[in-house]
Image (cartoon, grey):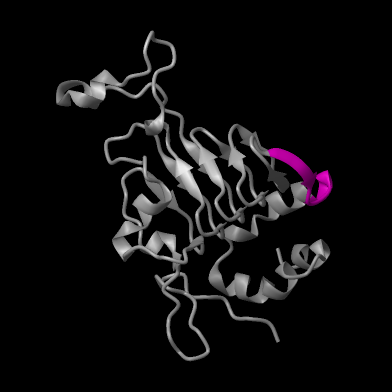
Amino acid sequence: MHPSLPDARRAHPITLPSGTPHRGTVFLNNVINHPRISVGDYSYASDFDPPPPDGWAARLAPYQFDFAQDYLRIGAFCQIAHGARFVGASANHDTRSLTTFPFPVFDPSTMLGYQPDTRDTIVGNDVWLGYNALIMAGARIGNGVIVGAGSVVRGVIPDYAVVAGNPARVVRMRFSDTEIATLNQIAWWNWPAHRLSDAIAALQSNDIDALTALA
């Protein structure tokens, strides 16, 4: 017997054996309504001290202001542990000038035009961000990546890499190049719910052929 597919429409998808919803875990696309943040289905965040439902955007991405010029895009089936944060490009100061002091921020007439860094931050599908991971502005994290606890991630992280450290470096690859290409081609995270339900057992195994047979 394998577990059932959770309901992607629920804000709190975990129900404890007592029947009580677990408030510390949320499907983010049901609680985040932000013009500069997009999140795919089934991607969740967990927090030991969860904010109110309308506070998850500020908790995870405190620099993702409504007037920011950059976007945070998170794919489907991502798993975000307690303490993980996204440091958006709005946090950066201009390092090319004689001072890093952000004078334009303190003047309403120049605030909106001032952002020396406008790079989007992109997280792929089925990415696991460990406890207290810090994702810096402009990071491009591939599908299936595992980010170790406390890591500081910047730059491009290849699909299905395991990274750790500050700065985060590739520790190992989870699968062979051929297997990674197959997983990206299958793109199971885009499947409809009925196909995902049938694929849970295969997804929980290490048998890529079993998953391929369902594609």
Where in the figure is residue 132, as x and y percent of width and height?
55, 51
Q: Residue at x 72, y 45 (%)?
A: 161
Please indicate whether residue 63 sits to the left or right of residue 78 in the image. left
From the viewer's perspective, tell me whether residue 3 is left or right of residue 48.
Answer: right
**On screen, residue 132 above or below 15:** above
Q: Position of residue 81 (x, y in %)?
A: 55, 59
What is the tally of numbered marks visible in this picture?
0
**Magenta span of residues:** 169-179
Q: Is residue 168 left or right of residue 111?
A: right
**Image location (x, y in percent) of residue 96:** 43, 11
Q: Which quadrant holds the C terminus?
A: bottom right
Vertical placement of 177 versus 111: above or below?
Answer: below
Q: Is residue 3 left or right of residue 8?
A: right
Q: Residue at x 70, y 44 (%)?
A: 163
173 is higher (above) or lower (below) than 212: above
Residue under the image location 35 percent in, 63 percent down: 51
> Is residue 5 magenta-colored?
no
What x and y, as percent, mark residue 98?
Answer: 38, 8
- Of 14 and 190, the residue lying toward us: 14
Which quadrant of the view contains residue 29? Answer: bottom left
Residue in the foreground of this view, choosing between 107 and 125: 107
Point 77% across, 43% down: residue: 171
Task: Work out which residue is located at the far top of the displayed protein and give it.
Answer: 98
Q: Residue furthest bottom?
A: 18
